[in-house]
Every structure is written in structure tokens, then in C-alpha cells.
Amino acid sequence: MDINDFRGIMTLITMLLFIGICIGVYSKKRKKTYDEAARMVLDEEQSIESAKHVESKG
């Protein structure tokens, strides 16, 4: 086994790992989690704005 065999095996392992990560990220099971994460920033901005609105009234 020389260095080129090792490189080929490492390339194959890396490619399979990348494909596995892509499948995990784009699976439908994770859609709800990612949608909630995408909304977190908007929800925080709305709560900050409503808090400022309450403070300005009070």
C-alpha cells in the first residue's frame, strides 16, 4: 500500500462523509428545526420592538 492508495481511500471517506452530511441537512425531518431557527432572529426583533414600544408609553 503506497501513498496514492491512502489518498484514494481518504478521498472516498471524505466524499461519503460529505454526502452523508448533505443528506442529513436536507432531510425533511430537520425542516421544522431549520424553520424555527430561521424565525428566531425575526421573533427577537419583534419582541425588542414591542418592549421599546411599551417603555415609550410607560
Image (tube, helix red, strand yellow):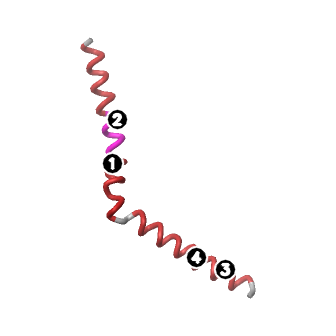
Earlier sequence position, callout 2 versus callout 3: 3
Q: Amino acid at mark 2?
A: Glu
Sequence-first tag of 2 and 1: 1
Q: Earlier in the sequence, mark 1 or mark 4?
A: 4
Q: Is the Cβ of the residue at disc 2 closer than 8 Å to that at disc 1?
A: no
- First to last magenta residue range: 39-45
The verdict on residue 51 being magenta is: no
Q: Look at discs 1 and 3 and give the one toward the viewer.
A: 1
Q: Residue furthest left?
A: 57
The Cα–Cα distance between marks 1 and 3, rounded to whole angstroms, is 40 Å
CA gap, disc 3 to disc 4?
10 Å
Q: Residues within 10 Å of mark 2 (few under 14, many from 20)?
A: few
The disc label shown at residue 13, or none: 4
* Real-space Cα separation, disc 2 to disc 3, in angstroms: 47 Å
Instruction: Determine the main secondary structure of the stretch shown in magenta.
Output: helix
Residue count near mark 1 (Cα–Cα under 10 Å), binned few <14, some 14–19, many ≥20: few
Closer to the eye: label 2 or 1: 1
Residue 58 picture quarter: top left
